[in-house]
Image (cartoon, rainbow, N blue to C red):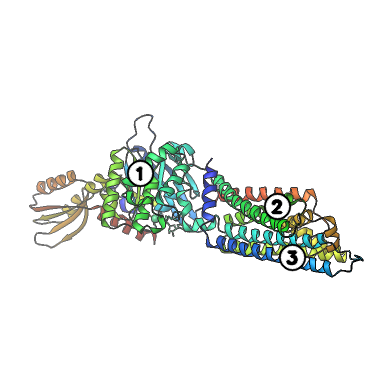
Amino acid sequence: MFGPIGHPPYGILTPMTETAVRTETEPPAGTAPAVETFGLRKVYGDRVAVEDLTLRVEEGEVFGFLGPNGAGKTTSVKMLMGLVRPTSGTARLLGRPLGDRAARAKIGFLPEMFRFHDWLTGEELLDIHGQLYGMSRAHRQRRIPEVLELVGLSHAGRQRVRTYSKGMQQRIGLAQALLNEPRLVFLDEPTSALDPIGRRDVRDIILRLRAAGMTVFLNSHLLSEVESVSDRVAIINHGRVAAIGPMADLLRRDLTVELRLSAVDPELLDDLGRLVHIEHVDGHERPTVVARVPDEETIARAVDLLVARGVRVYGVMPERRTLEQVFLDVVEKEGGKAE
Amino acid sequence: MKALVIARLTFREALQRKLIWGVLALSLVFVALYAFGFHLLVREWNEMQARRPADGGGSILTYEIFASSMVMLGLYTVNFLAGIMTIFAAVGAIASEIDSGTLHAIIPKPLARWELVLGKYLGYAGMLVVYIAIMVGSVMLTARLIGSYTPPNIIQGMLLIVLVAMILLSLTMLGSTIFSTIANGVIVFMLYGMAMTGGLVEQIGTVLSNQTMINIGIATSILLPSDSMWRLASYVVQPQIAISFTGPNPLGTTVPPSATAVQYAIAYCLILLLGAMLVFRRRDL
Ligand SMILES: Nc1ncnc2c1ncn2[C@@H]1O[C@H](COP(=O)(O)OP(=O)(O)O)[C@@H](O)[C@H]1O
Ligand SMILES: [Mg+2]
């Protein structure tokens, strides 16, 4: 059912089937996952924004939610934040059903499309959001300078938000999302308005949040943003999770290898093809076989097979894939399928 | 309560709007003109009295009638300005905040959606009550200080004008949860105009003893009771002599809407507000 990740053993990216969800590592007893969604779906008229979102994010994880524009990332998060009503499906945040007030008090959110009451000063704005979180006055007075400092706006707290630059507005948005010292925070394209320094700052902030044990759900279409901070990544396309897994696995498991051999014949290619996925074969004299393999171990087994058949192996050149390649691969194949 | 946080924010926000300041500026101009007008009336009346032959023969006109008409005119303007202010302030209460995105960071907070609607309602209501109290106070002070005239039941009159504003506020808020800001503005102003016209038709019907026209008036006041509540306000703040003298007229009435009509108007506010909460509960942002 999943084009790009079908034919085993080349199911390189964990397919998003129910079994895959269940076989992910169970959390320690008593700890609910931070985010758990079951078949979330959103249809606007005849347009499917989110097809079927089933995933799970453990507490303390930085989870990259990656996908091209229009993939359904924002709509997914809007459903979780109670901004949009799912057409079907359910979800739990911090172990509580959607909309639960106690859970909401422990969740922060930086919307993608946001504007604040910009006639307020940064401090006033945060104070009002703090009241909405249900924070006491003392808590707000302690926390507001802290978050302003965290996002690098200490100097601008007394300034009206209207006078802020785009980047500063995004920072105050981030401050607003972190104000309540949330256990779980959703950031939808948090660096879209930031320059490279701002991006680095946000990355550093996310790393600090992770170090503090916070769960971060990071929506982004920018690989670089997700790549450098995420523990796990989901690649979403056409409203579905196309691939999901720990970052390291996504990269390590999906390898392309180039083999330079003394000769090949159809029978050998057949046998080799049962082990690796042959993409193409170039040349007659010392042909090059380009193949995809699920992991490094398979390369070793392929070489064993070749040597056993008396083929001389002149070169084995594994090419590690970047997240970008994984991403493009998933998106292009899915795109082709959908059109 | 979180609704009060929203109410305070809404109140402050409304005071940031240029349109509101426009209405306030207009109101100031009105109060100045009104005081001047009342002053002219008093001077005119005094001159007329001076010209009158000493035997004091036969005018049924009393000063009370003129002064009362003047007060009514003043309150009518206040009622109208408050209505305009209500619609301008709340026309985009929900719709424009969905468009601008300010709600995206507020709705996920631990507050119920109905609390947001209630909070906004209370914020606008607070602003309108302050505005109406100041304006009615200005009209009454003018009548007292310049005209040496004190209208009866001014508190009831003021409360009824507040009720008119609440009726329009409920309608505008409900519309704002359903329609875009512009569509809502068009619809609310159309209904507002319709209610005024309906009230006028009813008055003409009363003069002509035409039941159909009276029924049209009643029907429009069921659809939107703003005009009928204004007419009740105008009725209670005038002495009987002034009402009998003016008769059925564009601004007032000789037949006051009943207590049931008032109860209906209050229920109307609450039901529309409830409707706004229910619609907004299901609204996608
Ligand atoms: N309110 C809406 N009405 C209609 N279509 C929508 C609406 N919101 C989003 N969509 C559509 O749903 C799809 C997913 O959008 P979105 O969730 O914003 O994607 P992403 O955040 O991944 O860029 C897009 O095709 C978009 O046009
Ligand atoms: Mg988006």
The reply to whether dot 3 and dot 2 touch (C-beta < 8 Å) is: no
- Which tag is nearer the camera, tag 3 or tag 1? 1
Q: Evaluate whether label 1 is on the same chain as label 2.
A: no
- Closer to the camera, A47 or A224? A224
Dot 3: what SS?
helix
Q: Secondary structure at mark 1?
A: helix
Q: Is residue A129 left or right of residue B200?
A: left
Quadrant where the C terminus of chain A sits is bottom left
Q: Nearer the viewer, mark 1 or mark 2?
A: 2
- Corner quadrant of residue B135: bottom right
Q: CA distance from mark 3 to mark 1?
A: 57 Å
Query: Residue tagged by mark 1?
Result: A145
Q: Give the residue at mark 2.
A: B158
Q: Which badge, 3 or 2, comes first in the chain's sequence?
A: 2
Q: For this view, does B156 lie left or right of residue B188?
A: right
Q: Is residue A322 above or below residue A62?
A: below
Q: Position of residue A8 (x, y in %)?
A: 28, 47
The residue carrying mark 3 is B197
Q: Secondary structure at mark 2?
A: helix
Query: Viewed as shown, does residue A291 lie left or right of B84?
Result: left
Mark 3 residue type: Thr
